[in-house]
Amino acid sequence: MRSDLPTVLKTLIPVYDEGGNFAGSRGGWGNGENPVAIAYRAKDNVNKSNFFFGNAFGEYDILKGLTFRTSFGVKYENYYNLSYTYPNLEFTEGSANSASSETSGYNTEWTWTNTLNYKANFNDAHSLNVLLGTEAIDNTYRQVQGNGNGYFITNSTDFFYVSQASKNSAASEGALGSLFSIFGKVDYSYKDRYILSGTVRRDGSSNFGSKNKYGTFPGVSGAWRVSQEEFMKSAGWLNDLKLRAGYGITGNQRIPSYQYLKRYATSINSASYPINNELVSGLWVSDYQNENVKWEQVASLNLGLDFSILGGKIDGAFDWYNKKTSDMLFALPLPGTAVGRAASPYVNIGDMQNKGVEFSLNYHHKQTDPNKFNFDIGANISRNKNTIVGLAPGINDVVYGAFRSMETSILRTGQPFGAFYGFKVAGIYQNEAELTQYPSYEKARVGGFRFEDVNGDGIIDAKDNTVIGSPHPDFTYSLNFNANYKNFDIMMYFYGSKGNENYEATRYFTDFGVFDGQKSVRVLDAWSPTNTSSMIPSQTKEEVSANEYASSSYFVQDASFFKMKNLQIGYNFSTDKLFGANTGVKRLRAYVGVTNLFTITKYEGLDPEVSATPSDYPALGVDFGVYPQSRQYMLGVSLGF
C-alpha cells in the first residue's frame, strides 16, 4: 500500500529554480517530490504489448438433432517494458543514482472445447436440449528482467543498457496452469410454460494436489410462465408473468500455483555457506505447502419473477438471492516463529454470505410513426448484505491493510468483508481537565483526539480498536434513458451508490504533522482555543502520540455518489438520399459522446468510486489517492451494410 507523495509537495515550491533546474523539497521543505520532474523523467519510459487471439470451430450433424462441435481458441500476448531512473537531487529523499529496468515476457492460453448437442421437439409441446462436453484450458507465463545501476552517461537513452551499468542483475520467473472440465446440461420445457434445467460440472485444476484436484458442481433451475395458464387468460393487461427459481454450486480455484508443494529457492543473500574459502549459495524454504488446499465453493439460491404489462409498455424483474461461500481461499499469515522468512500457503478458511434483492422497471413509449418522439426509460435498484459467517477455528479477527502506523481493515465474524478498523473519535480534548476527566492515552494533549473507551477499562489502547465503518453500500441504483425523434437519437446512463464509506488514507499525509509536506485546506479549520467546535486536531510541530494518526474514524467518510456515466447523441442519415437507392450502405450514423460528465458527492477525496487497495486481502474502499476516472469525448461514425 502506498500514497502518491507528489500530491503533498508544498505549493510554495516552484516547478523550476532560478537556474532553470527542477526545484524540490531538499533543504528542509518536507519530502514531497516535484510532479513535473517525475513526468519529465518518465517521458522515455516504454510500455508495449501485442495481443493476438483467434478461434476456429467445426460442426458435424451426426443424426437428426444430434450435432458434434469442436472449437479451439488461442490467446497470445507479448510485452516489453523499459523504465529509466535519473538523478533527482532536488528531492529530499533523492539521490545521484541512475538506473534502468528492462522487462520482457509473454502469456499464452489455449482452450479446446468439444460438445455433443441433442435437440428434439415432440408434438409441438415438449422441447428437449441435452448438451455433453469437455473443455481443456492451458496457460503459460514467462518473464525475464534485467536491472542496471550506475551509468556514466545519462543524457542519452542510447547508452542505457543493463550490461553497461556499473552494477547489474537479472531475474526471470514463470508460471504454468491448466484446467480440465467434463460437463453436462439438460433443458426441458412444456409449451414454454414449464421450464426445467439441470447442469453438472466436474472441474480439475492444476492449482490443487492429487487429493483435491477435482470438484463437482451441480445446478438446477426451473420456471413457470403463469401468464399462459387458463386462469390468467382473462387478465388482458398482463402480457407475461414468469416465476423463476434456481440453486447451484460453483467453484473458485484462482490462487497462485503449487500451493500444495513446499518450494525452495537459491539465493546467496538468504542461504549461503563458506566452502573452500568461497561463498556458495544454498537452498532455503521460500514457500510452505498445504497439501489439503481445495476448491472454494459458492452455493447460490435465487428466486425471481419477470413481468410485462399493458401491451409491453411496462416490464421488469425482481430477484432475491442468497449466496454462501465456504472453504474460502486465503493466504492466512502465520507467525514468523512458524514459517521464518518463507511465505505462508493458501488455506481454506471460513464462510461468507451475500444476501440481497434486485428490482428493475422499464417503460417503453413507442409510436407507430417513427418521426414522432419515442423513448425508453429504465431504473434498477439493488441491495446486498455481506457478512463473514466464520473464519478459521479459534480465529474471529484478522486485521490487515497495514501502512505505517495504520491498519485500515479487518475480517471479523459477523461483520462485512473488509470493514474499516480503528479508534472511534469521540471528540477533541478541550482543556487539561478533560485529560483526566475522560479515558486517556500516553502523550494525549489538549487539541488532540479523544477516543471512545470501547472496552470500558478507563485506558485508551489497542484493545479499544473497533469496527468504524464499511465500504459496502446500503444499495446501488441506475437509470438509463434512450430516445429518438425523427433522425436524432440520444442515450443517457446514470449510476449511484448510497451508504458506502471510504477510508481516505491520504489524510495521514495532509492532516497531521507526521509528513512535512503540503497540508489540506481542512487544517485551516483545525481546533484552537478560539475554534473549539472543530473536530480536526490542532497543528503542532511537537511530538505527539502515535494514536493521533493511527487508524481512526477520522479517516472514514460517507462516499455516497450519483454519476452521469454516459451521454451520446446521434444522427441517422438517409442512405438512399446520400448514395442512391442501389447503395450497399444500409445505415449511416454519426454520433458524439461523453463519459463521466459529472459526479455529485460529499466525499472529499478525488473520486468516491474507490475499488480496493492491494494488501494481504483486498482493502475495499481504502483510498490512497486513486486517480479519478477521466472524462472522455468521442466522435464517431458507424456503418451498416
Image: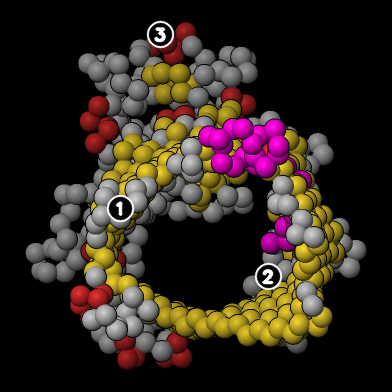
Q: Amino acid at mark 3?
A: Ala
Who is closer to the viewer here, 293 or 62? 62
Q: Closer to us: mark 3 or mark 1?
A: 1
Write the residue at 42% across / 32% down.
Answer: 558
Quarter of image, res 93: bottom left
Left or right for 308, reference 394: left
Q: Point out which mark residue 270 bears.
A: 2
Q: Position of residue 41 (x, y in %)?
A: 28, 73
Write the residue at 68% across / 81% down.
Answer: 71
Residue linked to disc 1: 369
Quarter of image, res 180: bottom right
Who is closer to the viewer here, 326 or 514? 326
Q: Would you place residue 553 above or below residue 184 in this image?
A: above
C-alpha distance separating marks 3 and 2: 54 Å
Q: Are marks 3 and 1 in contact (CB under 8 Å)?
A: no
Q: Would you place residue 20 above or below residue 469 in this image?
A: below
C-alpha distance separating marks 1 and 2: 78 Å
Q: Which residues are magenta?
A: 227-254
Q: Amino acid at mark 2?
A: Ser
Residue linked to disc 3: 433
